[in-house]
Image (cartoon, helix red, strand yellow):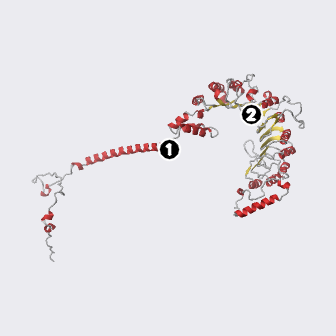
Amino acid sequence: MSATTYPARIPASVFTSPRRRRSSVKSYTPLPNLKTQVRNISSSPSSDDGYVPRSPAFMSIAYLREAIAAIDIKMAALIKERADLETKLETAVRLESPVLRLPSELLSNIFTVGVLGMGDEDPIMVTTLMLVCRYWADVALNTPVLWAKISVSPHNSLEKARRRLVRSKSCPLDITINYGPRMEYTQSVTEHIIHAMDLFRPVLWRTKSFSLTVPNRPHAHTALLRCQEDAPILENLTIQVYHSMQDDHYPSTPVSLFNGCTPSLRSCSITSFNFGWDLKLIKGLRVLKLGGYFNSSTPSATTLLDMLRQCPELEELTLRNMSDVDSQICSTKRIDDFDAPIVHKIHLPRLKKMTFYYSGNAHTRELMSHISFPNLESLELAYLENTTSLLQLLYAQALTRLPLKYLRIETCLFNEMKFVNLLRKLPSLVTLQLVDIEDISHHSLKALSSCQPWICPRLEFVTFDGCTSIDWDSLRAFVESRLPADPHAFKRYHSTASPGVSSASAAAADYARMKSRQDRSGHAALLAAPQRIQMIDVTRCNQISKEMLQWLRMYVPSVKYESAKGVWGEPTIL
């Protein structure tokens, strides 16, 4: 077969007119002159290698690398400029925040409330505020109230106290000198106390609160001998000596504190320091706390009564750890003769709280028999041996007025019938605490369970800590008698939801209950239902079993129990 032949191809330009093929001058773009290299034809091995093109200079590798490097430099500069702009933007946005636009006076008040208004001052709080920014640091440094609380102790140096003293300017001060009874402090504590008092002595005129805690009496006398300047704005004074029973050698002459000029003093708490029972220091007090006086240093009952006469507006009286020595008799009549009234009684209408903790039975009995306290709300009696006479004095006061709400008796003896008679006169009692009382029995619980009439109808918090003489049946009857008649009165202790009722049926039920109450007899109408027991404490009551505790938790919101423990914390009864 012969090979197929095709006709020759005619180019398209043959069919195009010359006029249409003429190109426009405007669209003409001259091409750059290409540099060619003419080689000698005779020297080349072949006639096809006569033309070799070369790349232009702007397309070289070095030029491209330099161009890329220049672009990288420009990009880095732009990125840095962008970061600077973002920082300035964040600063501008923060400056628009309302917190940073607060005036310094308002911010200072906020700091004062945040640091001092939380109860106990947190020393880290001020430094934390100063670390926020320079503006806050300047405001904190220029707020004297934040630096007015100054403390000197083994953990707070004199340099720190000196800095705070300078920053407090002329603000009233709260000064605390605290050195505990640890042996490593007693070697150099005298020197530290002297330096501290030399630092605070020039600013006693603007001291609002002064607290001194030292190991023994010589340290206290060393410090207080330097408190001879007037204290016109002093309101709170606290002096505490740890080793109150230690016989130390110190000047027998009483120290006159603050030159006898404390017109604003309202609270005084002194432990084991003999200040000469200066009546000028005690005059006009609202709170008086004395403790730690034994043997010959114990003030007599006459001295204590003279101090109370100087405090007609006294609100709180506390006597702790005072030996019961023979004191001068304040009245010719015997205290045990309760039918014979005492003519000249000290009237304390604002007295609301009294605490007698190992203060001596004779001291306590004589004091309570010579004062009247018609507004007393809290009373604590602890380690006073036989307190039957004190209960009789309380009963005599309750015949007129005694709105007692809190009663605590710890490790005392008393006549149970006298105690029950006193409870009958305390309708406002809310909290009753009996700790290590062996005289409480089922007779008291039975009286509290009786509704003819109710004894202490407002009682809600009961403590029988270490009262092993109470029996379970009486305790259960006492709790059941205080339960509400309506089982749905306390929805918290019922898991099932109450059925939904309409407003009309609820109104009808309320009207029916009101009519039923009106139909009762006059005597029954006077009997108000008692409050439900909200808390009961049966700690160290070994006669209470686990099943009994489970029953109590069903009807009492809070039940506290802890078994008796030995010296090393082990349970004594397994």
As rendered, which of 297 and 498 lies closer to the eye? 498
- What kind of residue is marked 2? Lys
Q: Would you say 401 lies left or right of 262 here?
A: right
Q: Position of residue 421 (x, y in %)?
A: 86, 45
Residue 121 lies in quadrant? top right
Alpha-carbon neighbours of circle 2 within 10 Å: few (<14), some, or many (≥20)? some
Q: Position of residue 473 (x, y in %)?
A: 82, 53
As rendered, which of 360 and 514 lies closer to the eye? 514
Residue 289's disc number: 2
Alpha-carbon neighbours of circle 1 within 10 Å: few (<14), some, or many (≥20)? few
Residue 535's disc number: none
Q: Position of residue 228 (x, y in %)?
A: 68, 23
Residue 285 lies in quadrant? top right
Q: Would you say 205 lies left or right of 449 here?
A: left
- What kind of residue is marked 1? Ser
Q: Residue furthest bottom?
A: 1
Q: Residue furthest left?
A: 42
Residue corresponding to mark 1: 97
In the picture, the quarter occupied by the N terminus is bottom left
| Residue 259 appears in the rendering | yes
Q: In the image, which is nearer the foreground, mark 1 or mark 2?
A: 1
State the SS at label 2. strand
Q: Position of residue 35 (x, y in %)?
A: 16, 51
- In this view, 247 is above or below 138: above
Label located before the other in sequence (1 or 2): 1
